[in-house]
Image (cartoon, rainbow, N blue to C red):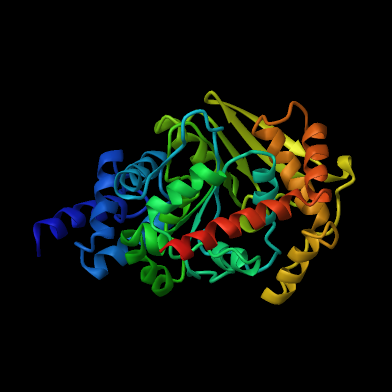
Amino acid sequence: MTESQELFKFYLKKIGSGEHTSHGLTREESAKALKLMISGQPTPAQIGAFMIAHRIRRPEPDELAGMLDTYFELGPKLISKKNQQRPICFGMPFDGRSKTAPIYPLTTLTLLSAGQPVILQGGKRMPTKYGITTLELFNALGLNLSGLTIKQVQIGFEKTGFAFIYQPEHFTQAETLISYRDELGKRPPIASMELLWTAHQGNHLIISGFVHPPTESRAWQTLKLIGEPNMISIKGLEGSTDLSTGRACITGVMKNAEMKRIILHPEEGNYACKDERWIEFADWKEKAIQLLQQKGALRNAVIWNSGVYLWLSENTKTLKEGLNKAEDIVMSNSNKSTLEALINWRNQLDITE
């Protein structure tokens, strides 16, 4: 057994000794453990055992902070240009969506039309859900977000305010752990960390989805540990940042490290309607194109999501103002113009290569 494998065995013993004798890792140990895993130094048996033991015990904020330290060190990096408005960094499950129609690609276009930069991240279809991905959804709209270097993503972010970090191309080391997700059949604790990670360095607003209250609580504590003063947590559709139009929306707003709870009701703005189900790719594409033509089943959801995020990100002073601004963008075809500008930018890259 190598020296790295012996060290990893020590970490495994700490978290996998049982209910009364197991201990959490320190932030430094957690950072080192993840670094060892994504570099493939432990044995496959050790990595699998670590992931499942960590999931059963649940990661502590210090451990999640350590994982983030490793991603910040080894992962891709984006920066805002001088005087650029702080971006919204959406944190959603990397294994995609399979039950409800995604709203966030259309919300992104609306926010960009309002001058609000947006950063997304994700990968290929991933276990355990193997849900529809960001890449596929934007492809349906005619925007190809693959095949870009991180330098091109940075230039595009400066030019358009939009960036998509595509893990298979921009963070290949993180891809090494995907097979374990499939073999174990469960999301590992790294999936919780992914909801909080962003490649952006500097001032930004992290908006993170969650399903279970303990996940939200750990997220708040973790971000405080790493010095992130601002965050919005969303009990969204399938753990995403998509706000429901069919129920009250539970959000948590952390500003300057102070938390407050905000409950949003879509019926107050006359946007309440049944959440659209995910049926198939062609169905979503048709509905998305209809939205870009100022009509269709996704209209209320896009205006509701966009208006709320314009307000929560302090682009507008009131929620009503945010909703009115979002509706003006959707009904004036501005988000379609934004999409066309992104497509033209992407096509120019292919021409000049």
To which quarter of the image does residue 24 belong? top left
On screen, residue 225 above or below 99: above
On screen, residue 253 above or below 111: above
Q: Can residue 214 be seen in this view?
A: no
Question: 346 and 162: which one is in front?
Answer: 346
Q: Where is residue 291 in the image (x, y as percent from the top left)?
A: 79, 59
Q: Is residue 178 left or right of residue 257?
A: left
Q: Position of residue 138 (x, y in %)?
A: 60, 63
Q: Position of residue 353 (x, y in %)?
A: 40, 64
Question: 269 and 4: which one is in front?
Answer: 269
On screen, residue 249 above or below 9: above
To which quarter of the image does residue 273 belong? bottom right
Total tally of numbered discs in the picture? 0
Q: Residue at x 36, y 49 (%)?
A: 76
Question: 159 and 313: which one is in front?
Answer: 159
Q: Position of residue 241 (x, y in %)?
A: 63, 50
Question: 44 and 282: which one is in front?
Answer: 282
Q: Is residue 134 visible?
A: yes
Q: Is residue 318 left or right of residue 241?
A: right
Quadrant (top left, top right, bottom left, bottom right) of the N terminus: bottom left
Q: Which residue is drawn at 72% across and 74% down?
A: 279
